[in-house]
Image (spheres, rainbow, N blue to C red):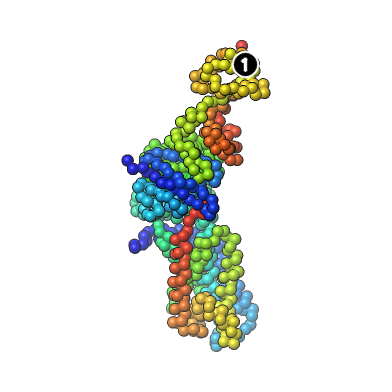
């Protein structure tokens, strides 16, 4: 099977153009992470589990991961918007396979997440902690599989969703729990069995963990565990996403 | 020659509703076929199956001889679609929408640029090509989508309600573009509409479709003449002699006048007026596709069709005359 890269690029190019033109969306995604970083991070004078770092510095990697999470999920769900505009039909009727469409869309999600991550890295470097170039680049590198995994989740759900009304549900029942149960704001401890169990099941825990390791050298799991869990989920979500895209048809 | 579009017992069921019921049809190259029918008759579903957006429940469809179920990607290269709802991206400019389309259809940069220029010229959008589509009017948007649908020079063009929701002047504009396309290239066009006038002016043949089945298939004029006569309303004193002229097939007293069905109206109207004694008012109502439709389906096409029928569809000639 050959991949029609030009068509994939066409889908990606459209996503890039739309992303760079929707400034409101770019900024609004940063609001929650910034609130956590500066209101919760500064306001709650908690002790940092990582020695030598403040609590704000401890949760900074979590908010960075949160940016990836929110950008990717929202981006994926936005395919519902394409459906409503009927723009999706234009692409579905074009000589491009559903797999190629998925690939183009997923690359668009990665692009958005990388852009948002860069913004938060700059903010972080100025106001929160020293970030050297290598760890910044490593963060962006980690952002690639993480955002792909989560974008695929968003696209899968968005591919099934009929209207934007489901958006709030996904945020309440998936995105926020994934964030709160990941240990982005606290350390996962053995004493609290249920929190720990939820953290282990939650793929986002490993995303936070690997970014925290890169930025402040503190982590709960090994790099190998983090990466294998992320890649396992990535394969699963992409597989489901491509399957769902394959069944995309007009409802009428 | 091989037909451009061929369907054999094409059927689509949605749970217990049969939207399209064993449709068999052949459309030859360069022909324009209009699907006419009320909302929910199965027009859009048929189009969606032909352009591979929807898998048929059973039966088959061939576009330029290619099986639409087995080789959707090959079929999509041959087809262009203009959808019922706006389907251009309003965050992108008109030019970008066209360029992305060219990329999706595998056109190379040079020919894409040349073709886009040409299509922008034909649709009169050159000056606005650099603006985001959200600033376009409904008619401009539709023109852009027509330009886009034709960009890759499809062998078969599908138009799903191409002028739905447009004002009458924008609608006429679209018709004139479509007329141009029809005469300039040998594109096979399939359009769905519930505007009688649209079907009448654009189609070579009309398929009247109701509840997923084709109930009549012929040229607009043949469909109209199969139904018969134009109607003349005369007010005033009308002689029995006039009412019994050989070309009058039927008459009925209505209020102060008569409703008279006349064969060969253009030729015979003069004679009728001469024989009638004292006519104070004349109204002529040409047989319309809506009459055909009413007769075939036994119902009005729908609210939107009705609204139109008051003004544009029926060419009503009305004048007051006081005979000497």
Q: Nearer the viewer, residue B93 or B216?
A: B216
Single out the residue that lies furthest toward the left. Answer: B1
Seen at 44% across and 75% down, the residue is: A231
Seen at 36% across and 60% down, the residue is: A4
Using a 10 Å C-alpha cutoff, classify the residue at mark 1 as few (fewer than 14 neighbours), some (14 to 19) or many (20 or more).
some
Q: Quadrant of the N terminus of chain A?
A: bottom left
Seen at 42% across and 42% down, the residue is: B25
Please say if B74 is above or below A33: above
Q: Quadrant of residue B120?
A: top left
Say if residue A177 shows up in the picture: yes
Please say if B5 is above or below B255: below
Q: Quadrant of residue B122?
A: top left
Q: Nearer the viewer, residue B103 or A37?
A: B103
Q: Nearer the viewer, residue B68 or A175?
A: B68
Q: Chain of mark 1?
A: B
Residue A31: x and y in percent read 59, 69
Seen at 56% across and 81% down, the residue is: A197
Residue A216: x and y in percent read 50, 82
Residue B145: x and y in percent read 46, 47
Instruction: Write down the residue under mark 1.
Output: B238
Left or right of B100 in this view: A197: right
Q: Secondary structure at mark 1?
A: loop
Residue A238: x and y in percent read 45, 68
Single out the residue that lies furthest toward the right. Answer: B255
Q: Quadrant of residue A142?
A: bottom left
């Amino acid at each position: 099977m050959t991949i029609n890269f030009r068509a994939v690029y066409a889908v990606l190019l459209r996503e890039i153009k739309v992303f760079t033109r929707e400034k409101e969306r770019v900024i609004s995604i940063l609001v929650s992470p910034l609130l956590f970083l500066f209101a919760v991070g500064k306001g709650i004078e908690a002790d940092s589990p990582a020695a030598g770092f403040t609590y704000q510095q401890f949760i900074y990697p979590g908010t960075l991961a949160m940016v990836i999470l929110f950008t990717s999920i929202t981006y994926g769900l936005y395919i519902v918007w394409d459906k409503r505009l009927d723009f999706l039909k234009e692409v579905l009727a074009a000589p491009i396979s559903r797999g190629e469409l998925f690939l183009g869309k997923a690359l668009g999600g990665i692009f958005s997440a990388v852009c948002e991550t860069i913004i938060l890295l700059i903010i972080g470097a100025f106001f929160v902690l020293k970030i050297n170039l290598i760890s910044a680049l490593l963060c962006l590198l980690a952002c690639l599989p993480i955002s792909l995994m989560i974008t695929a989740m968003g696209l899968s759900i968005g591919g099934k969703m009929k209207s934007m009304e489901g958006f709030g549900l996904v945020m309440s029942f998936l995105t926020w729990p994934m964030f709160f149960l990941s240990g982005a704001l606290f350390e996962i401890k053995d004493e609290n069995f249920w929190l720990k169990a939820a953290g282990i099941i939650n793929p986002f825990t490993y995303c936070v963990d690997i970014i925290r390791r890169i930025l402040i050298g503190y982590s709960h799991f090994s790099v190998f565990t983090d990466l294998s869990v992320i890649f396992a989920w990535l394969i699963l979500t992409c597989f489901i996403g491509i399957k769902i895209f394959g069944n995309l048809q007009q409802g009428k | 020659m091989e037909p451009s579009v061929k369907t054999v017992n094409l059927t689509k069921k949605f749970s217990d509703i049969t939207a399209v019921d064993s449709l068999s049809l052949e459309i030859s190259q360069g022909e324009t076929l209009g699907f006419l029918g009320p909302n929910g008759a199965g027009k859009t579903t048929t189009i969606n199956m032909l352009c591979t957006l929807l898998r048929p429940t059973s039966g088959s469809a061939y576009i330029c001889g290619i099986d639409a179920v087995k080789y959707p990607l090959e079929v999509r290269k041959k087809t262009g679609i203009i959808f019922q709802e706006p389907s251009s991206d309003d965050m992108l400019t008109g030019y970008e929408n066209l360029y992305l389309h060219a990329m999706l259809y595998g056109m190379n940069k040079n020919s894409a640029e040349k073709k886009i220029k040409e299509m922008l010229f034909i649709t009169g959008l050159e000056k606005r090509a650099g603006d985001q589509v959200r600033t376009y009017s409904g008619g401009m948007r539709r023109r852009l989508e027509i330009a886009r649908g034709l960009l890759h020079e499809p062998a078969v063009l599908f138009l799903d309600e191409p002028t739905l929701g447009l004002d009458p002047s924008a609608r006429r504009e679209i018709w004139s573009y479509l007329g141009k396309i029809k005469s300039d290239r040998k594109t096979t066009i399939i359009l769905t509409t519930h505007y009688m006038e649209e079907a009448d002016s654009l189609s070579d043949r009309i398929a009247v479709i109701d509840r997923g089945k084709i109930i009549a298939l012929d040229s607009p004029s043949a469909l109209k003449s199969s139904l018969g006569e134009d109607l003349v309303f005369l007010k005033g004193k009308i002689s029995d002699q006039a009412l019994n002229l050989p070309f009058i097939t039927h008459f009925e007293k209505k209020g102060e006048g008569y409703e008279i069905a006349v064969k060969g109206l253009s030729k015979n109207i003069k004679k009728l007026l001469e024989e009638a004694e004292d006519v104070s008012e004349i109204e002529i109502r040409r047989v319309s596709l809506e009459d055909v439709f009413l007769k075939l389906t036994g119902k009005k096409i729908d609210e939107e069709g009705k609204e139109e029928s008051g003004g544009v569809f029926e060419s009503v000639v009305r004048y007051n005359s006081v005979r000497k």
